Amino acid sequence: MHNFRADIDSEVFKVKEFGKPIYFAVGENIASNTNQIVLRKPDGTEITKAATTGTSQYSSPTKGLMAANTYVTYTPVKDEIDVAGTWHVRVTSAAGTTYLKKTEWQQLIVKP
């Protein structure tokens, strides 16, 4: 398990907001893995989505430099962020058939 850094514009979204990417630094090369993010809604319901490995260096304005192949991105789609409250997100990654937690849960605040 590595330190988790989320690069989300102030880690705040609004209900029904979509199209704004979320960047997650994992801290190790995960380019050959199958990567996912898990979003946990305030009621505990979990949504698992495919995440894209960042293939070029990314300079976050708030979290610093993320090296190529050591972070993933996910962009919520319309109606996915559907309830206000404290959500939690984390990255899982698989080099085979077993997914391993790569990050701890991180808060994502969703405003009405």
Image (cartoon, grey):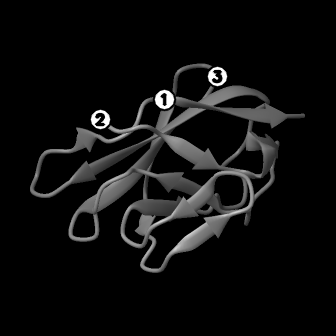
Vertical comparison of 87 with 21: above or below: above
Left or right, 85 with reference to 40: right
Under circle 1, the secondary element is loop
Q: Comparing marks 1 and 2, which lies closer to the viewer?
A: 2
Vertical comparison of 27 with 47: above or below: below
Under circle 3, the secondary element is loop
Q: Quadrant of the C terminus?
A: top right
Under circle 2, the secondary element is loop
Q: Residue at x 9, y 56 (%)?
A: 96
Q: Residue furthest top?
A: 43
Residue 56 seen from this side: yes
Q: Quadrant of the N terminus?
A: top left
Sooner in the amino-acid sequence: mark 1 or mark 2: 2
Mark 3–mark 1 contact, CB under 8 Å? no
* Residue 105, numbered label: 1
- Three-letter amino acid code at disc 2? Met
Vertical comparison of 21 with 112: above or below: below
* Residue 15, numbered label: none
* Towards the viewer: 83 or 87: 87
Q: Residue at x 36, y 69 (%)?
A: 69
Left or right, 106 with reference to 30: right
* Residue 42, numbered label: 3
Q: Comparing marks 3 and 2, which lies closer to the viewer?
A: 2
Q: Quadrant of residue 101?
A: top left
